[in-house]
């Protein structure tokens, strides 16, 4: 069903992302005590099998924060941050970033989980505002693993006959950083929930 979304429907999903990431930027600015801007350059539907290839190295180690969605909309939302993004955020927050993100200490893991909580939660709040649905996200879970392993786990947890995923690409700008950081929000409503969302949006 996801692969049949039209450009107009994707534009609405992108607009929801723009509003959600705007709220996330405000919250992250407070958390990091620096100006943060988050934009949504793209929203698209792609086969789950292709997700690892949005990264230059499909075997790259990434940080993934996952939240299950309950109540009117059920499914999952997943935030994937590259190793460079994790290092930059950690350096901004604590003054030094880890060389190896598989060696994140408890404080760093807690911090990244909160970053995921803010970004995923802001998107969910925006989606709830657009649709009027009551969406209850569960506490976030975090993993640091190869992108291929992360996607394999996600694939097992969603509907077995859904081969596509809604991907919202974000660019993160932190005051003082010379480069744009990348983040990827993957929205995985089950088929019933996706149909309800599209109907609510008049599609």
Image (tube, grey):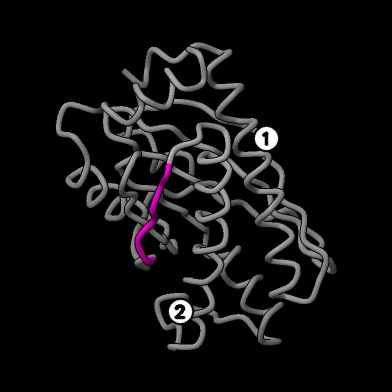
Residue drawn 65% across and 31% down?
Answer: 15
* Number of marks present in the image shown: 2
Classify mark 2: helix, strand or loop. Answer: helix
Q: Are marks 2 and 1 in contact (CB under 8 Å)?
A: no
**Label 2 vs 1, first from the N-terminus:** 1
Which residue occupies the foreground of this view, 143 or 6? Answer: 6
Residue drawn 68% across and 66% down?
Answer: 28
Residue 147 point in image, percent of width and height? 36, 53
Residue drawn 37% across and 68% down?
Answer: 142
Vertical position of residue 166 compared to residue 37: above or below: above
Classify mark 1: helix, strand or loop. Answer: strand
Q: Is residue 159 left or right of residue 176?
A: left
Residue 156 point in image, percent of width and height? 17, 45
Which residue occupies the foreground of this view, 2 or 195? Answer: 195
Q: Is residue 93 magenta?
A: no
Residue drawn 50% across and 47% down?
Answer: 124
Q: Is residue 137 magenta?
A: yes
| Residue at numbered disc 2 | 109
Q: Residues within 10 Å of mark 1 (few under 14, many from 20)?
A: few
| Residue at numbered disc 1 | 41
Vertical position of residue 3 compared to residue 66: above or below: above
Residue 60 sits in quarter = bottom left
Q: Quadrant of the N terminus?
A: top left
Residue 49 sits in quarter = top left
Residue 76 point in image, percent of width and height? 34, 47
Magenta span covers which residues? 134-139
Residue 145 point in image, percent of width and height? 34, 64
Q: Residues within 10 Å of mark 2 (few under 14, many from 20)?
A: some
Q: Is residue 42 left or right of residue 166?
A: right
Q: CA distance from mark 2 to mark 1?
A: 27 Å
Q: Is residue 106 left or right of residue 148?
A: right
């Amino acid at each position: 069903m996801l692969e049949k979304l039209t450009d107009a429907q994707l534009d609405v999903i992108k607009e929801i992302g723009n509003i959600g990431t705007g709220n996330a930027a405000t919250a992250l600015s407070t958390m990091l005590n620096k100006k943060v801007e988050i934009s949504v350059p793209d929203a698209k539907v792609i086969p789950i099998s292709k997700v690892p290839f949005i990264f230059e190295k499909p075997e790259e180690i990434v940080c993934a924060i996952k939240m299950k969605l309950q109540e009117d909309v059920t499914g999952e939302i997943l935030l994937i941050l590259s190793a460079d993004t994790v290092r930059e955020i950690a350096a901004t927050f604590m003054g030094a970033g880890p060389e190896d993100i598989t060696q994140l200490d408890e404080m760093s893991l807690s911090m990244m989980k909160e970053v995921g909580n803010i970004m995923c939660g802001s998107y969910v709040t925006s989606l709830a505002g657009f649709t009027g649905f009551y969406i209850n996200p569960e506490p976030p879970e975090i993993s640091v693993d190869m992108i291929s392993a992360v996607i394999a786990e996600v694939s097992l947890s969603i509907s077995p006959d859904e081969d596509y995923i809604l991907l919202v690409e974000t660019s993160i700008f932190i005051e003082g950083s010379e480069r744009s950081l990348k983040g990827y929000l993957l929205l995985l409503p089950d088929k019933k929930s996706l149909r309800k969302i599209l109907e609510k949006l008049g599609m």
